[in-house]
Amino acid sequence: MKKDEASCAGARVEKLVELRLSKDGSRRSFLKSALAAAVTGTVASGCDHPFVKDLLQKHYKELSDEDKKELFQRIEQRTHAWSGVRVKVSDPQPLDGVHWGYALNLNHCNGNRRCVEACARENNLPNDPEIRYIRVVEADNGSQHLEHGTVNYDREQVPEPGKYYLPVQCHQCRNPPCVKACPTKATWQEPDGIVVVDYDWCIGCRYCQAACPYHARRFNWTVPSIEPDRINPDQGYLSNRIRPVGVIEKCTFCLHRVRRGRYPACFEACPTGARKFGNLADPSSEVRQIIASKRVWILKEDLGTDPRFFYFYA
Amino acid sequence: MIRYLQYLKSCAGCVLRGGRNYYLWMGGLFVLTFLGGISWYHHIADGLGITNMSNQVSWGIGIANFVYFVGVAASVALLIVPAYIYRIEEFKAVVVLAEIIAVISVVMCLSFIISDLGRPDRLLHLSPGLGVINLPSSHLAWDVMVFSVQLVLSLYIPAYLLYKRYLGQAPNLAFVLPPVMLSMLWAVIIHTVTAFLLSALKSRDFWNTGLLAPRFLVSAAVSGPAIILLCFAAINRYGGMRIADRVFDYLAHVLRVMLPVNLFLLGCEVFTELHSGTAVTESARYLFFGLGEHTLLPKFIWTAIVFDVVALVILLVPRWRQQPRLLYASCALLVFSIWVEKGMGLVLPGFTPSPLGEVVEYVPNASEIVLTIGILAAGALLFTAAAKVTIAVQTGRLRLQEGDA
């Protein structure tokens, strides 16, 4: 697309040179035109440079369909260039009348952390330095004091007697402190309730990370290193595409899956059936049934973040 | 226009000429700045992973220094009050120098912030027109706005006053007083907005207190005058300009009043946090007593409190505070103690423990320390150069000559 424009500009300049030459065949004006052509050419090819393109890229919400097409192609080509893997970047849109919600049965969760691993696989999370969206807190029975629990437990067998397990990921709050914090609107809440990040707009100030009471946001401290054979080629622009260095990322309830009628990866991986996922706007959905009939509680409810993530006992 | 270029040329000449010690000092600072620049380059090229920050403690020494120097920039208003409200001549002579300290503090703040960004190449996303600014909800966006205004104000005031002085003309008060009055208000605003940036976060109990903004202002009224007093003492000694004793007395007086207030506010905070003994006060316990094997911060904060008390005793005993050496020593103690109290001692406990209860101890590594020293050296370099020009203009050594332009 841009290449055509550039060659177009080149043709225009050539024409201009010809015109000038025919008008007054003087050497001086030819030189002038040639200089103009050289400058235009440099500018045009400069705009083609990937660095300049990145610099001039617009906010997600200002991208036209054309822009998106070209941008996704660029990302696909870049990934192919370093990994040899052909990926497909897409941008599934929120579904009308859907508000995604999660419910997690703490009686069933046994801390096996399959969800953590499946999430990492699905979302192209690097191992070095390790980024994981879900943290499972192992805490003593009879205490909700998180400081007394640990997320770094290493056991041959779970569950450990006398302990319970509390998986925490992005709660997709209705009143998200992270969205309020972002100085550049690089993170926002989609109509279906999922809080997303435009990885190409984030400036990496990490204020959202400080604002999140659920420790749900992760920063790319280095260029994410991911082995080519671990790359998931089905990539959403606002979800699991491979992130650039220096930006924030987070759980998106696997929006590239759920908006196409599939379940999130953590849901599918859970062997205990502790995870329940569905449409909060639909009174007959399982999550709504659970909220209506089970003993449900919300983590840090006193902060008024109004999450779309519920814990329950059943 | 040509006259202004001529002025800039003579300013440059003034900066470039100097004795052997001047060259040594500037050369040393330049080397440190250069080393800091190399470290900054690595921050950009390799990512912030070369620092010791983590997802648990995601802000470190950079933000601590930012908060600290916001205070220094704000505190300059304390010198503008006697100069322009009480119209005391001795103070008018130092207003330009004070404003230069302010503008350099702002430049250092910006350097600390920008070098702490994951994507400094996307800084334009924050600018009006080109970017998307999240107003009114983001406190950080507000901070960017008020900082831009502060930068313009504190550049404009000394630049205008100096140029007028160079021309040998009296400054037009209509061009001076409104921005000067505004800059006094702005000093409160930049520091309050910076405090709100932290205190508005409900996720971080340690910062989430109404006392934070008042504490910021009061501690700024300690660290600022201490730094200004030391800078002025250096000018008296090496700069070839005599700053009136009255200015020093005033600054010492400000310290004598504000330091006890600062200690009082700190005490209020400590009492409430530790006496309540609730789970959300874990951060305060980390700061004052340490959590488990993580006991680095208590060493710093208790040293700072001891420094505060020693400085206070010096400042309160007339016989001691009248000895310049003891006065300067107490200022040096305060420069450090406030840096601990509202820098590292404020930022780090906010992140420790993390919202899910993880305790990760952060200590800046070599690359962060080199970068910090580089930015501090750049600030000192700029200050020396700007102060040299200012003194030359103020004392009439640098003046528009009859034959010029």
Image: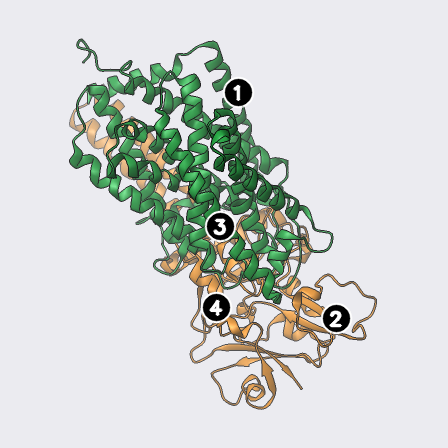
> In the rendered image, which quarter contains the C terminus of chain A?
bottom right
Labels 3 and 2: the sequence-earlier one: 2
Question: To which chain does the residue with label 2 belong?
Answer: A
Question: To which chain does the residue with label 3 belong?
Answer: A
Residue A207 image position (x, y, % from top left): 49, 54
* Closer to the camera in the image, B134 or B176: B176
Q: CA distance from mark 4 to mark 1?
A: 57 Å
Given this view, does label 3 or label 1 mark the residue nearer the observer?
A: 1
Mark 2: few/some/many CA within 10 Å (<14, 14-19, 20+)? some
Task: Verify CB contact (< 8 Å) between mark 3 and mark 4.
Answer: no
SS at badge 2: loop
Mark 1: few/some/many CA within 10 Å (<14, 14-19, 20+)? some
Q: CA distance from mark 3 to mark 1?
A: 32 Å
Given this view, does label 3 or label 2 mark the residue nearer the observer?
A: 3
Q: Which mark is residue B394?
A: none
Chain A pictured colour: orange
Q: CA distance from mark 4 to mark 2?
A: 31 Å
